[in-house]
Image (spheres, coloured by chain):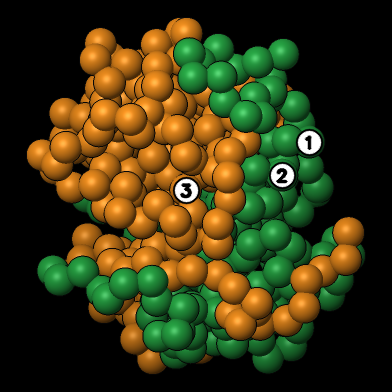
Chain colours: A orange, B green
């Protein structure tokens, strides 16, 4: 089997599920917790949250498997919390099937019902506008109605089943201007 | 203006384009270069590439503005290159409007025409299966047909207009088992 390039690359293969998983295990991602009230509070950790459009503000994420994921994807509105290094334990809790999630004192319901995690650096209240079946998953697009800005710590990244923090020491090159 | 939570959060605001941009500037992301032949070689840097489904393998990314972005999104097939720290200069070149991109010796056409960057850690040849207009952008879903695995260096992350590398020193906690 070979990828049909004229350059005869070293390790060409047809796509397999396992190789695909390996590729994305090595693709770093920010970490979010997406919550909804459907009908009771439900939440999942997602490493697929990405900005789609700034005007109007819209984002995407994908969900697959699990009743929590389905309840989040089926909700009319969700809150997308962008998490940082102070919250690694919270993120792991929301990623663990069966783990206790909405611990007392860690969240409050918005007036519209969705759970808002108290100490999230950013909480974006969104209306889901599209649910696109892709493979065995749902790709979700949502427009952002309200943004809550909380306390920030160091940025957190998920990569190869581990969490990293970004600091001045991890910089490759100085910040771009602008 | 206030986010309607019962907890009276500190900095609640309605979503604005600028605040949305700020939130996602602080959400770390892996970096990819997406190429196509439409009809000549075209490529863009994307920080929105995410895994959607492993079975069948599928991913998403979004594009907005720019003729290169439009040509990539309108192509039937694309190659998604997941890039790492050895390629920060390449990634910046593909992110810069008007910069020279397909430099001699850095790429080869696949038999099916798409440009494959020679030294990408991962190159995933994809068929675009959905193009979903969201706000002013296109959210693209693509199924992965072939995977090429190249040489790897340290993982690279884009955050707040700067590039970081992940190392053992940036780990928050040890790797999860499994």
Tell me: B106 left or right of A28: right
Q: Cα distance, mark 1 to mark 3?
A: 19 Å
Q: Nearer the viewer, residue B106 or B94?
A: B94
| Chain on which label 3 sits | A
In the rendered image, residue A99, in percent from the top left (x then y), is placed at: 14, 42
Horizontal relation, residue A90 to residue B28: left or right: left
Q: On the rendered image, what quadrant is the N terminus of chain B found in?
A: top right
Q: Are marks 2 and 1 in contact (CB under 8 Å)?
A: yes
> Dots 2 and 3: beta carbons under 8 Å?
no
Instruction: Measuring from the top left, give residue B126's x and y in whole percent.
Output: 44, 56
Image height check: is B142 above or below A109?
below
Judging depth in this view, the residue of B10 and A50 nearest the camera is: B10
Q: Residues within 10 Å of mark 3 (few under 14, many from 20)?
A: many
Specify the subunit that label 2 lies on.
B
Q: Marks 1 and 3: same chain?
A: no
Q: Residue at x 88, y 59 (%)?
A: A178
- Describe the element under mark 3 as helix, strand or loop: loop
Q: CA distance from mark 2 to mark 3?
A: 14 Å
Which label number is shown at residue A83?
Answer: 3
Q: Mark 1 or mark 3: which is in front?
A: 3
* Residue B58 visible, this angle: no
Q: Position of residue A100 (x, y in %)?
A: 16, 37
Secondary structure category for the residue under label 1: helix
The residue depicted at 49 percent of the width and 54 percent of the height is A84
State which quarter of the image contains the C terminus of chain B.
bottom left
User: Going by the image, does A38 lie left or right of A140?
Assistant: left
According to the picture, the residue beneath numbered tag 2 turns out to be B22
Residue B18's label in the rendered image is: 1
Asked whether residue B22 appears in the rendered view, the answer is: yes
Q: Are marks 2 and 1 on the same chain?
A: yes
Q: Position of residue A14 (x, y in %)?
A: 29, 69
- Residue B154 vertical placement versus B35 (above, below): below
């Amino acid at each position: 089997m070979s990828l049909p390039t004229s350059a005869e690359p070293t390790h060409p293969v047809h796509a397999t599920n396992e190789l695909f998983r390996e590729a994305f295990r090595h693709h770093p991602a920010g970490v979010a917790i997406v919550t909804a009230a459907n009908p009771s509070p439900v939440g999942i950790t997602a490493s697929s949250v990405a900005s789609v459009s700034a005007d109007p503000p819209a984002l995407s994420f994908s969900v697959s498997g699990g009743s929590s994921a389905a309840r989040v994807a089926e909700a009319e509105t969700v809150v997308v919390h962008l998490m940082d290094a102070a919250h690694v334990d919270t993120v792991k809790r929301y990623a663990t099937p069966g783990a206790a999630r909405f611990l007392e004192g860690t969240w409050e319901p918005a007036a519209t019902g969705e759970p808002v995690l108290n100490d999230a650096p950013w909480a974006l209240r969104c209306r889901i506008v599209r649910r696109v079946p892709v493979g065995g998953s749902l790709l979700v697009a949502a427009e952002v109605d309200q943004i809550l800005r909380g306390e920030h710590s160091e940025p957190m990244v998920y990569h190869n089943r581990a969490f990293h923090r970004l600091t001045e020491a991890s910089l490759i090159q100085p910040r771009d201007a602008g």
